[in-house]
Amino acid sequence: MMWLSRRQFRVQALVGAGALLVAAVFLIRLGWDVRDGYELYRSHCVNRADCAEAADRFRGAHKNTLLLLAAGLGLVPAVAGAFWGAPLIARELEGGTHRLVWNQSVTRPRWLLGKVLLVGLASVLLTGATAALLTWAAHPYDEVAKDQFSTLVFGARGIAPIGHATLAFAFGTVTGLLLRRTLPAMAVTLVGFLAFQFFFPLVVRPALIPPERATLAMTAQAINGAQNLGGFGGGSVIGGVGIPGEPDAWIADTSPLRTADGKNLDTAVFGGCVDSPPRTGAGGTFGDAAVCLARLDLHVDVSYHPMSRYWTFQWLETGIYLALGGILVLFGLRRIRRGAG
């Protein structure tokens, strides 16, 4: 049985091995380039002003490349689930070849479990190895950028991609078992898992650990940046204002602008400040708005997670994905024992 499973999977395995080799060569080369840039950044980091300028140059040189790679790695589990997991059983049921195996001495659950372990392990190894290479390549950049909590980056670093690959493959396999058609199963797996990948970081991840809370004063200069919140992107500042003592924190949620008495800022009051007539002399409308807004003592209440919780979130998310994948596999084993197909 295992010999037949290996033979059926050999083409996919060769394609996966080739893709991993290409990715390894590229990421190792990129890792050395990032490290060269990091050494240049450190050599120019003499005082605070120079450090800020050097850090901006360093981030600008690698930010887009690393974001594209993170987005690409985020697609690997979904693609593996769609192209390796979904056809695993659906192709057998669609072509009727499962009957030959089911008439042998091998039980249906054992047949399914053997195929899942072989191909699923290959999917996890491919994703995990790529994630490890990307984590290594981007490590100096992450030390400077401190954006590991952003949605794309978090899902492409550390151990989280292992959990993602496990769930995606299990979901694809069970989808193929239920639909019994290869192409519909592939489409459902790809769309369904990608939808879950948007849902989890937006809804579930911020609530895995009770957040810390803080109040940030919002000056007139900061209000223009107040819409640049960190819920999806994992930012650590609002309008240039950061969490005191936690410069690298992940701001998970924010309240609307509030006045000193804790009430939400009324739109009419805010508009009245911004549209107030200009004063005579320098300053103009903005000067009047600044004075008006300053009297309101505006602030926002924020929920945040310190950077020290990063690996706790990694382990929790990986465990949840592994558990969900295991539940799906158990469901598939029970389903096939009852004669699916």
Image (spheres, rainbow, N blue to C red):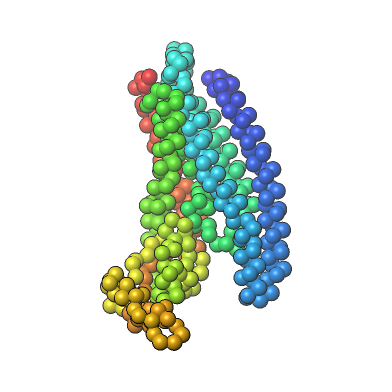
Number of numbered discs overlaid on the protein picture: 0
* Furthest-front residue in this view: 280
x and y, in percent, of residue 161 in the image:
52, 45
x and y, in percent, of residue 130 in the image:
60, 43
Q: Nearer the viewer, residue 83 or 280?
A: 280
Which residue does the image show at 45% across and 39% down from the upper left? Answer: 167
The quadrant in which residue 291 appears is bottom left
Looking at the picture, does residue 79 appear above or below residue 215?
A: above
Left or right: residue 9 compared with residue 174:
right
* Furthest-bottom residue in this view: 281
Note whether residue 326 is visible.
no
Looking at the picture, does residue 25 appear above or below residue 312?
A: above
Q: Nearer the viewer, residue 289 or 18?
A: 289
x and y, in percent, of residue 186 in the image:
45, 30
Q: Nearer the viewer, residue 327 or 171?
A: 171
Which residue does the image show at 31% across and 78% down from the upper left? Answer: 260
Note whether residue 150 is visible.
yes
Left or right: residue 93 compared with residue 128:
left
Which residue does the image show at 67% across and 38% down from the upper left? Answer: 21
x and y, in percent, of residue 172 in the image:
44, 32
Which residue does the image show at 38% across and 25% down from the upper left? Answer: 179
Looking at the picture, does residue 97 appear above or below residue 63?
A: above
- Give the position of the C terminus as an image quadrant: top left
Q: Nearer the viewer, residue 111 or 176?
A: 176
